[in-house]
Amino acid sequence: MASRTELWAAISWATVATIAGAAVAPLEPSVLEEGLILHVAQRMIDGERLYSDVSFFTGPFPFQLLAGFFRIFGEHLFVARGILVALQALATGLIFTSVRRSAGPASAHLVAAIVAFAPILLFPFFTFYFYSSICYYLAVIAIFAG
């Protein structure tokens, strides 16, 4: 069970990650790869089926996730980028908690700072909705779950 200090530190780092991710999300134009995913998700909302009506060469998860959020929040680029900001915050809090439990508080703060500022430090790799960014965040969640 997490202590109150650990919980508040994880929430604080998640907040920093949210600010960092949200600060750079509007800067990156919708590059070709992200535009394809957005387009396919929009076509899926219109009733087309992936791999039957829409041909693509990768797995369905990014498309299904984005199509689901488009149905809830509307079809906009910032919905896709907002998903990444939320995943960035979650990943930062979880990585802080994981490292703190295994290596101690000093290392946890250093690692959390690196993860929180990754969207700025590695711009634009973590700011646009693409397979690699989704996979990174899901991998961090899996590490915490493990």
Image (cartoon, helix red, strand yellow):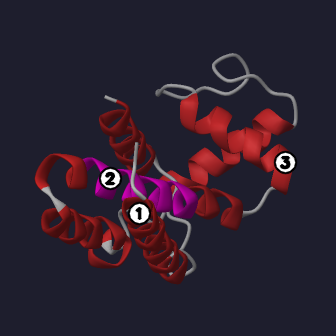
Tell me the residue that label 1 is attached to.
10
Q: Are the two marked residues, 2 and 1, in contact with CB atoms closer than 8 angstroms?
A: yes
The disc label shown at residue 72, or none = 3
Counting residues from the N terminus, which is met first, the one under dot 2 or under dot 3?
A: 3
Q: Mark 3 vs mark 1: give the one in front.
A: 1
Give the residue pinned by disc 2.
97
Q: In the displayed structure, does residue 76 sit left or right of residue 126?
A: right
Against 57, residue 127 (above or below) is below
- How many numbered callouts? 3
Q: Is residue 97 magenta?
A: yes
Q: Amino acid at mark 1?
A: Ala
User: Is residue 74 shown to the viewer in this render?
Assistant: no
Q: Measuring 87% from the left and 29% from the top, which residue is drawn there? A: 47
Q: Is residue 25 left or right of 126 when viewed as pictured? A: right
Other-residue count near label 2 (Cα within 10 Å), few / some / many at <14 / 14–19 / ≥20: many
Of callouts 3 and 1, which one flags the residue occurring earlier in the amino acid sequence?
Answer: 1
The structure residue drawn at horizontal position 35% and vertical position 70%, both measured from the top left corner, is 116
Give 46 or 16, whichever is nearer the viewer. 16
- The kind of residue on which mark 3 rests is Ile
> Does the rendering let one see residue 42?
yes
Residue 141 vertical position relative to residue 74 in the rendered view, above or below? above
Labels 2 and 1: the sequence-earlier one:
1
Q: Majority secondary structure of the magenta segment?
A: helix
User: Helix, strand or loop at disc 1?
Assistant: helix
Magenta range: 84-98
* Viewer-nearest residue: 50 or 71: 71
